[in-house]
Image (cartoon, grey):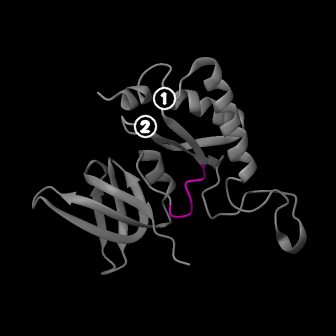
């Protein structure tokens, strides 16, 4: 197992450390991209509690023209700076970020990648592009459409192309992301 992958697993894992820091700063850890064995970037993607990218942040204090005084959407630049500073301060004490590695903290973006089961559950009602393996034919298929549900280890979406409901086992998904249409 690579050093980077071993950091992600188990007690005291990199994931848990970053998750705790993110939550203490009022955001959630959405995903991580680990550096390669040769170095690179540790990318930390954060979101706001209960706010999906591209959606207005819930707020009872409305500013001019109905805009929230806390801003729109999920993560702010200030959120990223706070989490990044906390992680770098912790790294100075305990060196948990791999050597030869840059730290990047950002929002996953409006066309965020979907990898974890909670990502797929959070995408219900959104348009997604899914690339998956068809076990019977050993081929790869790409389908774009509205995510209808996630249950029993499978994702169901209504295909844009034919309007049919397609069921895709989560274990067969090779790549997935939100496909927001502007």
What crowding class fits label 2: few (fewer than 14 Cα within 10 Å), some (14-19), or many (20 or more)?
A: some
Q: At which x and y percent is residue 140?
A: 20, 63
Among the 4 quarters of the image, the one containing residue 129? bottom left
Q: What's the CA distance linking mark 2 and mark 1? A: 7 Å
* Disc 2, SS: loop
- In this rendering, the answer to whether 68 lies above or below 48 is below
Compared across the picture, whether 109 is left or right of 84 comes to: left
Residue 107 part of the magenta-drawn span: yes
The residue singled out by tag 2 in the image is 39
Q: Residue at x 28, y 68 (%)?
A: 142
How crowded pointer 1 is (Cα within 10 Å; few <14, some 14-19, many 20+) is rated as few
Looking at the image, residue 101 lies above or below residue 61: above
Residue nearest the viewer, comparing 45 with 126? 45
Residue displayed at 67% across by 42% down:
27
Contact? badges 2 and 1 (CB < 8 Å):
yes
- Residue 82's place in the image compared with 124, above or below, is above
Q: Main secondary structure of the magenta part?
A: loop
For the N terminus, the image quarter is top left
Q: Please state the extent of the stretch shown in magenta in the rendering.
A: 106-111
């Amino acid at each position: 197992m690579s050093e980077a992958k071993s950091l992600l697993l188990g007690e005291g894992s990199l994931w848990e450390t970053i998750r705790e820091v993110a939550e203490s700063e009022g955001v959630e850890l959405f995903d991580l991209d680990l550096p390669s064995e040769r170095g690179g970037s540790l990318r930390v993607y954060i979101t706001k509690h209960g706010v999906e990218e591209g959606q207005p942040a819930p707020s009872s204090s409305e500013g001019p023209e109905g805009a929230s005084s806390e801003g729109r959407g999920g993560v702010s630049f200030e959120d990223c700076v706070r989490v990044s500073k906390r992680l770098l301060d912790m790294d100075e004490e305990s060196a948990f970020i791999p050597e030869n590695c840059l730290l990047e903290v950002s929002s996953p973006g409006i066309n965020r990648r979907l990898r974890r089961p909670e990502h797929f559950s959070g995408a219900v009602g959104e348009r997604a592009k899914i690339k998956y393996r068809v076990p019977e034919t050993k081929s790869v298929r790409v389908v774009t459409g509205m995510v209808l549900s996630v249950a029993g280890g499978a994702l169901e979406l209504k295909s844009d192309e034919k309007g049919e409901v397609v069921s895709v086992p989560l274990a067969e998904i090779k790549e997935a992301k939100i496909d927001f249409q502007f």
